[in-house]
Image: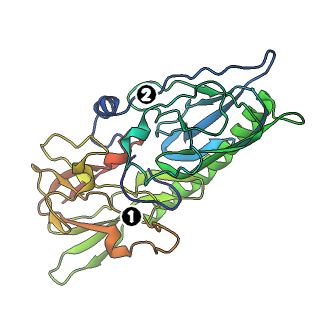
Amino acid sequence: MFGTEIRSSRVMGAGMVAVAAVALTLGTLVPVATAASAKTTSGSTGVVVRAGVNAPKDPNVAVLEYLPAAITVKVDTPVTWSWKGTIEPHSVTFLAPGQQLPPPGSDPTLFGATPPIGAYDGQSFVNSGLQPAGAPAKPFTMSFAKPGKFSYYCVIHPGMVGTVNVVASGKTDSKAAVTKRGAAQAARWIKEGTAAKKALVKRGKARSKANSDGSRTWTIQMGASTKHTDILAFAPTPKGIKAGDHVDFVNNSTAPHTATFAGKQPPITNPIGPQTDNPSPGPSPQTLNKTDLFNTGLVPPDASSGPDSPPPPKAARTFTYVVPAKGKYAYYCILHTLSGMGGTIKAS
């Protein structure tokens, strides 16, 4: 969910970690936004925009878009953002003039709410806070004091951008039109993500290469991404892994992920803690056991960190574990437990 890695498009559930435990942890870290009231002109009709959505039939498919992404309303019309149907947290964040978003997850103060004071005029920082995060999400409502085109962002998904075009008069979007267009976009992006999930599953079929010592190295893909979605799932764990084999976790998506084995230790549930970021007990490769905690740290995405920076090479996006003995080894992504991103290595 969070991370200090910079993503050019999109950043960011329950493997072996209880969702309740994750929600409790997040609830202690992230102030939950309250609905912000906005003064409205008598008789004005508000509109509702959805802040992301997870596919109803597959929570692994997360749509990282405001639905719809652009709307047109009159001055003083209330606009409400709803988190209904999303598992992955998002924010609605309007920046002050000259302000820029820091790298995703690097400033936890952005996870809390900064409601507007009266109708928004584009001259201040306004933020819904990150929702949902440990408590049911509450709608966030604001109105706009003057005409203009106002862009807003998600503080952990830099490619998630919306626009409110505010006019003094003329044609605007009705509540019904906004709802209809948002639903159509959601259906289209869910279809896009579902196809990507199928491709991830297909690519994840048993693949391995022989090593000089007689063992084999298997590959597990860490998620996938499309223009509008993140697939928050590991490719299926290959069958046929034997004691002594190696498993490469490779991140070819545009979101950071972890591959974390808790063993008999308390699982890592804090997505913004140092334990999440750093490999444990050390850098790749690591030999698993069934007792200790093992963590890749944040495996960087296949995405550039800026206009002049190429994506990290495959070697930097790969973490290798050695499976020393027969048995089951459950793993999960700390950042995306709520979307069910986890799996189990079964070695024979």
Q: Residue furthest bottom?
A: 212
- Place of residue 225 in the rendered image (x, y in percent of width and height, measured from the top left): 51, 58
- Place of residue 32 in the rendered image (x, y in percent of width and height, measured from the top left): 43, 27
Horizontal arrangement in the rendering, residue 119 relative to residue 76 (left or right): left
Under tag 2, what secondary structure?
A: loop
- Place of residue 260 in the rendered image (x, y in percent of width and height, measured from the top left): 25, 52
Under tag 1, what secondary structure?
A: loop
Q: Relative to 225, is 97 above or below?
A: above
Mark 1 and mark 2: span between their CA atoms?
A: 31 Å
Q: Which amino acid type is marked by label 2? A: Val
**Which image quadrant is residue 247 in?**
bottom left
- Write the residue at 59% across / 58% down: 227
The answer to which of 172 and 325 lies nearer the viewer is 172
Horizontal arrangement in the rendering, residue 35 relative to residue 169 (left or right): left
- Write the residue at 13% across / 58% down: 281
Disc nearer the start of the sequence (1/2):
2
**Which image quadrant is residue 36 in?**
top right
Question: Can residue 82 be seen from the camera position used here?
Answer: yes
Q: Relative to 208, is 197 above or below?
A: above
Question: Can residue 330 be seen from the camera position used here?
Answer: no
The answer to which of 96 and 309 lies nearer the viewer is 96
Mark 1 or 2, which is nearer the eye?
2
Q: Relative to 217, is 47 above or below?
A: above
Q: Relative to 195, is 304 above or below?
A: below
Residue topped by disc 2:
32
Circle 2: is it few (<14), some (14-19), or many (20+) Cα within 10 Å?
many
Which quadrant holds the C terminus? bottom left
Residue topped by disc 1:
251
Q: Which amino acid type is marked by label 1? A: Asn
